[in-house]
Image (cartoon, rainbow, N blue to C red):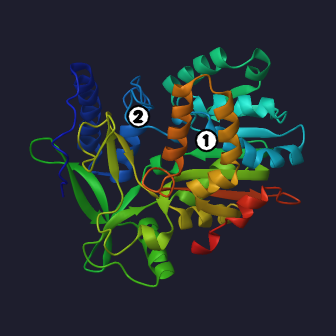
Amino acid sequence: MTTPRSSRLPEPDADELAHSERLLQHLRETIAAHGPMPFSQYMERCLYAPGLGYYSAGKTKFGEAGDFVTAPELGELFARCVVHAVQPVLALLGSEVDFLELGGGSGAFAEAALLALAENSVLPRRYLILEPSADLRERQRERLTAALPAGVMTRVAWLDRPPEENWRGILFANEVIDALPTTRFMIRNSEVYEEYVALDGEARLVRVDRPADALVAGAVRHVERDLGRTFEDGYRSEILPQLPYWMQAIAGSLEAGLMLFIDYGYVRREFYLPERQDGTLMAHYRHRAHNDPLHLPGLNDLTASVDFTALAEAGNSAGFGVATYLPQAHFLIAAGLQDIFEHAYEQAADDAARHRLAQQVKKLTLPDQMGERFQAMLLARGLPALPLPAELLAADQGGRL
């Protein structure tokens, strides 16, 4: 099976083409030696193969010069709202509290969050960044060293793997779940098949379907039971059968605190709408979205929307309860966006800065921007009380899950 791509994508330069060709050769050799690879493995190699994957190589990913813009890249309002939402929990947990950010991106969130935490006198003992990309880690280190007071910078540390010792605090992940290597499934003759990547007779990458193993088939049947309907023949979508195991791995040692996930996605019944017959998988290249994940591997960010019902289930299985779930716009407003914006507006140096602040608010909250497409989920464990802003708890839409 192949899918069309946009014919209007920008042309890569010679270095980019050479980089993609190196990854393509690696993929060809792997498939030739071991046979077709599950799409999840293909996505993992495209994003994270050492020195070759999208997040492992040196090209700029984030912001106007990259392939997409995340909320922290827009400015500091987003991070300040997150800090306002979680700082009561930091204060409750005391001096031994840590803040763990999964995938630090450009370092923009950490910079704004740490400055806000310092201003509010709720700096954690450690600000930890779990960053698998050596290239991004170095960019983050350079940015934070230049931007933060030395006393704040001493609290920042990078991790290769989740903490093994029990800890207390906040785990934060913005646009992380969408980049987990996803399994693609389809239904044929009422049976579950899994999408693989293979080679055709001319050594080109092609997508093929094979009978799913018990783990994938079981995950799909669980979704069908939860939805109260079976997927029709030809239906194709994504699923993360490994999500409960991933959740336990990254959060199993968080004995008391909050996890905050912000990402684009849907509750399950919206994710698997009958009319969404080819899932949510997208490729992003230089601010253009297209639907051919086999095009120029290594140069595209590959993502799939998040099934937030599955995220809640994974959190529950790891011992966490959903504290609140709501669209990003509602989360930011309940987390003090109005006051934070007004304060920044008063402090702005000129009209251009004030205009940029207004544009931030629009992009973060308007329904056709990030406001409705992105969702926020807070999960809690081990807290004697839930000291979140009352507005945040009142805006909860967890009943939709």
Q: Nearer the viewer, residue 52 or 27?
A: 52
Which residue was labeled with disc 1?
78
Question: Is residue 218 in view from this perspective?
Answer: no
Q: Is residue 400 above or below residue 310?
A: below
Q: Which of labels 1 and 2 is toward the front?
A: 1
Give the side of residue 27 with respect to residue 270, left or right: left
Q: Amino acid at mark 1?
A: Phe
Quadrant where the N terminus lies? bottom left
Residue at 69 percent of width and 41 percent of height: 340
As drawn, the residue found furthest toward the front would be 351
Q: Nearer the viewer, residue 284 or 314?
A: 284
Q: Amino acid at mark 2?
A: Ala
Question: Is residue 170 in view from this perspective?
Answer: yes
Q: Nearer the viewer, residue 330 or 176?
A: 330
User: Which quarter of the picture shows residue 147?
Assistant: top right
As drawn, the residue found furthest toward the bottom would be 228
How many numbered discs, if any?
2
Q: Spatial distance from mark 1 to mark 2, Cα to Cα?
A: 31 Å
Give the side of residue 68 with respect to residue 22, left or right: right
User: Which quarter of the picture shows residue 29?
Assistant: top left
* Residue 379 position within the rendered picture, expressed as x and y whole percent measured from the top left: 70, 58
* Residue 315 position within the rendered picture, expressed as x and y whole percent measured from the top left: 65, 61
Q: Which structural element holds mark 2?
A: loop
Q: Nearer the viewer, residue 25 or 332?
A: 332
* Residue 183 position within the rendered picture, expressed as x and y whole percent measured from the top left: 39, 58
Q: Which structural element holds mark 1?
A: helix
Which residue was labeled with disc 2?
49
* Residue 262 position within the rendered picture, expressed as x and y whole percent measured from the top left: 57, 51
- Disc ID at residue 6: none
Residue at 77 percent of width and 26 percent of height: 155
- Sequence order check: which comes first, mark 1 or mark 2? 2
